[in-house]
């Protein structure tokens, strides 16, 4: 008689994972996350930077251009650990710095 299957356990990698930091990896400043999308396998997060636009029409007033600077692509399975790390960072930052909700539901730093 066959043995019934036991509880599912996550597979253990047969190898050791070692982080290799790159000193030459450039940093990119982003003002905010503009949008995200998924192709069913990967998720793409598009980050933008806000830059003042050249004033061509004085009657139009000041204008800011939103310029995409990074499109981060990761497998959908990476989104949960990413969320957890981001949640931990936000919690720690809120304890150390004042972050207040804005009318739109996002956060602003004061």
Image: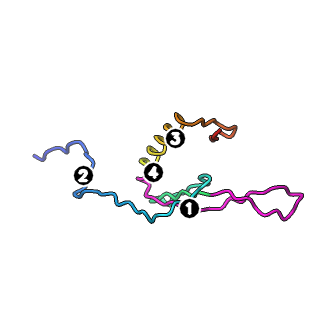
Which comes before the other along the chain, label 4 or label 1?
1
Which residue: 46% across, 64% down? 25
Label 2–label 3 contact, CB within 8 A? no
Which residue: 34% across, 57% down? 19
Q: Is residue 20 left or right of 47 when viewed as pictured?
A: left
Is residue 1 or residue 81 the one in the foreground? 81
Q: Say if 51 sits above or below 8 in the image.
A: below
Marks 2 and 3: which is nearer the front? 3
Which residue occupies the extreme front position in the image?
Answer: 23
Please state the extent of the stretch shown in magenta in the rendering. 49-78
Circle 3 packing at 10 Å, graded few (<14), some (14-19), many (20+), is: some
Quadrant that contains the C terminus: top right
Q: Which residue is mark 3?
A: 90
Which comes before the other along the chain, label 4 or label 3?
4
Q: CA separation, marks 1 and 3? A: 21 Å
Q: Which residue is mark 4?
A: 79
Marks 1 and 2: which is nearer the front? 1
Q: CA separation, marks 2 and 3? A: 30 Å
Where does the image place residue 91, in percent across and percent down from the top left? 50, 37
Q: Which residue is mark 2?
A: 12
Q: How is the image coloured?
A: rainbow
Marks 4 and 3: which is nearer the front? 3
Q: CA separation, marks 4 and 1? A: 17 Å
């Amino acid at each position: 008689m066959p043995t019934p299957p036991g509880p599912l356990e996550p597979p253990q990698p047969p190898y050791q994972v070692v982080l290799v930091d790159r000193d030459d990896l450039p940093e990119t400043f982003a003002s905010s996350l503009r949008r995200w999308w998924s192709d069913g396998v990967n998720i793409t997060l598009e980050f933008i930077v806000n830059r003042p636009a050249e004033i061509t029409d004085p009657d139009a007033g000041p204008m800011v251009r939103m310029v995409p600077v990074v499109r981060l692509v990761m497998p959908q399975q990476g989104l949960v650990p990413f969320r957890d790390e981001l949640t931990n960072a936000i919690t720690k930052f809120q304890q150390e710095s004042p972050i207040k909700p804005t009318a739109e539901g996002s956060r602003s730093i004061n």
